[in-house]
Amino acid sequence: MAETCTRCPDDPGVAAPGAAIQTGSRPTGAQLTVTELDCPSEEAVIRKLLAGVPGAGQASFDYMQRRVTLPPEADPEAAEQAIRAGGFTVAKTQEVGTALDAGASETGLTRREVVLMAAAGAAAIGSEVVAWSSGNETSWPVGVLAAAAIALGGIDTLKKGWTALCTFTLNINLLMMIAVIGAIIIGQWPEAAVVIWLFGIAEAIEKLAVVRARNAVRALMQLAPETALVKQADGTVLEVASSHVAVGAAIHVRPGQRVPLDGVVTAGHSAVDEAPITGESIPVDKAPGARVFAGTINQQGLLEVNVTAAAGNTTLARIVRTVQEAQATRAPTQRFVDQFARYYTPAVVLVALAVAIVPPLAFGGGWFDWLYKALVLLVIACPCALVISTPVTVVSGLAAAARRGILVKGGLFLEQGRRLRVLAVDKTGTLTEGKPALIDVLALDGFAERDARRLAASLDSHSEHPVARAIVAGWTEKAGLAEVAGFESLPGRGVRGTIDGTTYLLGNRRLASENGALTAELDATLNAQEAQGRTTVILIEGSRALAVFAVADKVRAESRQAVARLADLGVRTVMLTGDNERTAQAVAAELGISQVRAQMLPEDKLAAIQALQREIGPVGMVGDGVNDAPALAQADIGIAMGMAGTDVAVETADVALMKDDLRRVADFIGLSKATSRVLWQNITVALGLKAIVFALAMAGVASLWLAVLADVGASLLVVANGLRLLRTRSLADR
């Protein structure tokens, strides 16, 4: 972990600027984009095809991006050839880490596919009508229409089924191929046609659902304009592709335009809509020195911006990249569904086989009737609606979170957020604005206030902590600060340094006590200041206190509302701070927080998280993404605040909030609860409908087309239910 600069009473463990918690991950190799990869059925076949490629056995799959990520030791060319040999289309090969390509939004189905599906439906229904009217299901008109329906709408399914058979993979396509061939063999030609057509519709629904979820993520990237107005050396402005604009270039952003790249305003004043990044609905005023982000909308005046990040590394690009990577991370429910389907399908196939063979042999039943029931059970075995419901729901939840400025690093954390019982929060910068100001300076024992200000400002000029910056800002004279020798950070207590041959200490009550400077008079002075919610810093020489600095930080207006909403969600808020007890209690009382743990070192916060986990249950920790690294790592879910524009958003925490607004934590937990509800609703619907059709089949009532129709209906219901998450409202905007 990075070396800390810890002089502040409130945050005794502040990491050096730019530091981040390092998270290890398995190295990855090339990525193959497979056009047909939409669900676990294709994954199982491709895994079999890759089994013969050295090093490719541990490939990972992302249905949303249709992407197969190979281990670094695997040969991408050999893997591509193996997949192509199975009848799949490999669109492109790319290396991990390349710049994102927003691409165009997908429409889902081509006009050709729609026409073929319509023609197949007409032929299938026509065969049923002719068979019903003539009373003959094997006449040549019925046969011609059924064959046309199968040829127009079922060739792809039959090809996939044959590939599955060749690779000894039991999947939905193989089951449908067997069902269709079986129906033809027993003379149920119209049903074979209707079954293959309805299954094609189910596949189309699945494709459309995946495409919509995929487009919800792609839409984020498309927020950034493809071109930027770049200022030239002669003052003219030239329109250039955003991907070709270098860091340091000056660009113009006109009123009504989207900002193409991250940067800092160098000229102009305007208000910018940052909702795409932070979820903030109110435009933010921008003046020279303010940061702007790609994808945000300039409302009024012309802005000149100095570019600080290339197109592939903007805050927006990192958000999209993280969401895309998160899609490949299986949530617990998703892993359960995949595992369930793995055992469920073979089990139903065995039951169907037993139904086809046992009754005719053991009880003298009719072969036709029991074979037909077995075929119905095979169709029921298709877990299409079940397996498509989970990735669509999870991706919809991730996209909904990203739209609100909440970056969730995987379906695992999205689903686990609902389990949080305690939220541990730091004070400075989390509950407060993190912009403390020097309120008062109390010189002691006749020491000159001017000298005290100069000494304290000189010492704190070596620290980046907000309290330190407040003390430095308090030195307003033109005379320069003193040179500090032997500067030393004292974690959890303050700092030490030598000025003009004299060693001084600057820090909190703990530091004063350790050095024998905490007299009864000083203690009373500190108590009086802290009772007003102020943070106190003491300047010490030897064992003598020279001055007391009183610093106050304004409580965020939204913090009280956030604490109340968290309580409504069943989450207790606990303040963990390095500040003194009185100041912490004053802030807690203002916000309605009942549990406060003050004067905590980084290791104390870690121990507090562990104790809360043992006593209450899952704990979330909110910090700035760098501070309190051990506590963030120990928490069940680490949440970083105010991460817009920094790499920390994708480095330090499980969840990153683009804006310093604690209400977004309540949004995240609420969205997690909604995602979990939708997941289990979908599982219930998918399995419930299959259970009903299974019972009807055993009673001899269900037909092949009814079984497929039930699967189509279930797919429609679970997909629509999963996509509802995209319309989830933000608590912070209500």
Image (cartoon, rainbow, N blue to C red):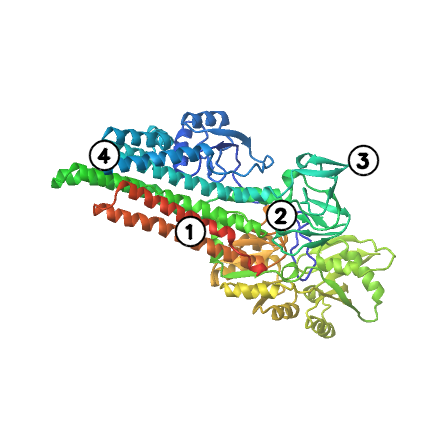
The mark found on residue 137 in the picture is 4
Q: Is residue 438 left or right of residue 36?
A: right
Q: Name the residue type under label 2.
A: Val
Q: Position of residue 73 (x, y in %)?
A: 50, 30
Per the image, the residue denoted by label 2 is 648
Element assignment for label 4? loop
Q: Residues within 10 Å of mark 1 (few under 14, many from 20)?
A: many
Residue positioned 54% across, 64% down in the render: 565
Per the image, the residue denoted by label 3 is 233
Quote the CA–CA distance across marks 1 and 3.
56 Å
Q: Toward which corner of the image does residue 510 lie, by quadrant? A: bottom right
Element assignment for label 1? helix
Which of 606/512 is in front? 606
Q: Name the residue type under label 3.
A: Ala
Disc 2 and disc 4 in contact, CB within 8 angstroms? no
Quote the CA–CA distance across marks 4 and 1.
42 Å
